[in-house]
Amino acid sequence: MAVPGLRLVFNAFGSLAERPMRTLLTMLGIIIGVAAVYTMLAIGEGTQKKILESLDGTQARSITVFPNWTRGRSSQKRPYRRLNEADLLEVRALPGVEAATGNLSREYPVITDATDWSSDIRGTDQDYLFANDFELEAGRDITETDLARKETFAVLGQTVVKNVFGGQYPVGAKIKISNVPFTVIGTVAKAPETGWSNGRDRDNFVLVPRSTLRDRLVGGDYLVRNHVNQYRIIGENQKVLDRIEEDLDAILRRSRGLSAADAPDFRVLNFSANRQQYAETQRTLSLLLATMGIVSLVVGGVGVMNIMLVSVTERTREIGLRMSLGARRSDILSQFLTEALLICILSGLIGLGVGYGVSTLGLGGDDIEMIFAPEIAILAFGSAVLVGVVFGYLPAHSASRLNPVEALRHE
């Protein structure tokens, strides 16, 4: 059984070798198609990896809370009520909460003897950096003791370090904010690229104890006495976020005098609620990329079919002669189908190499990550073989159905 099969393959090689330029041009379409499928699926896999990596960070385990009020008719409006410090402490003590921070901010100039730079002054606490994916670069962070003592300490973002201190090491230096002297105790590394910036410089900030901002900078503003603009809560894992949100709702309703039937005057954004949307987006993107590659492969398959039909026409007398010498219709079918498969198999292997070369040479760019998993290679190569069977069958079937007498008369 093996010898006739090998003979069939050798004969197919011989037929293709007789017309090398035509064979090469036919293969080119499949090569491009396989390379496209392979590369597109690799890009989709790389995109999925990036999304999953982003979902593993603190953002994926975060809940953000901020006040809200109805903007309707006068009868529907309610007073704007800020969040407060007492509720934040109660939320921080909930089971499953890894970090809970509050933010209170104002814009003030940061002044030294030589410079004057406007920056976002944020009253924060010991959980702020972790909850917002920031990392301390030098010095130390604000502590719980600093809040309790209302210390005049400051931690600077990179834009402030650059514009106020010319990029020099600032820890230990003195600055003034609204005529209040502060000591720089640390600097924050450059903000991560991910995250919502609202078009603003994410590194242009100064962190100070929240209690100090309230009492020393904002002063007698009744709106900020023990109040916080928003909460950011980080769960130990995504599984506990829904339970934390339920407990959070109960705490805020009790604190704000709302019954279970009342509409909340606060908004809660649970990141896990967007997880399904991220997954659907990723699947849609992968499907779109794969479809683009498959279209290229189908175009190459049409080229294979056309060339094989031309080949059948050119070799009609040969087919008639073989059939008159005893070749069966199945033998003719196998011959031409093997040629089509051989073209697609060789093209598939070359296409895989071209697709892999795109990644190796970095043609996708730094912003595009490609992952060439074995299953992707198998799928791309299998698609090429399937194209060979589907688009090679019609010419092979057409050849096998020729009338031997009419074939021998063909000019």
Image: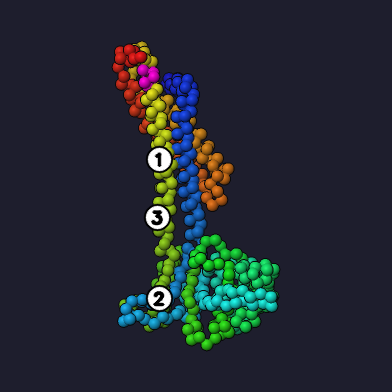
Q: Nearer the viewer, residue 215 or 260?
A: 215
Which sits earlier in the primary sequence, circle 1 or circle 3? 3
| Residue 291 location (% of width, % of height) | 40, 44
Three-letter amino acid code of the residue under disc 3: Glu
> In the rendering, at what x and y percent does residue 287 appear?
40, 47
x 51%, y 34%: residue: 350
Residue that mark 3 sits on: 280
According to the picture, the residue beneath numbered tag 1 turns out to be 295
* Quarter of the image where one finds residue 331: top left
- Image: magenta residue range: 312-316
Query: How many marks are shown on the rendered structure?
Result: 3
Dot 1 amino acid type: Val
- Residue 397 location in percent, x, y? 33, 25
Q: Which residue is more in the foreground, 242 or 42?
A: 42
Of 3 and 43, nearer the camera is 43
Mark 3: which secondary structure? helix
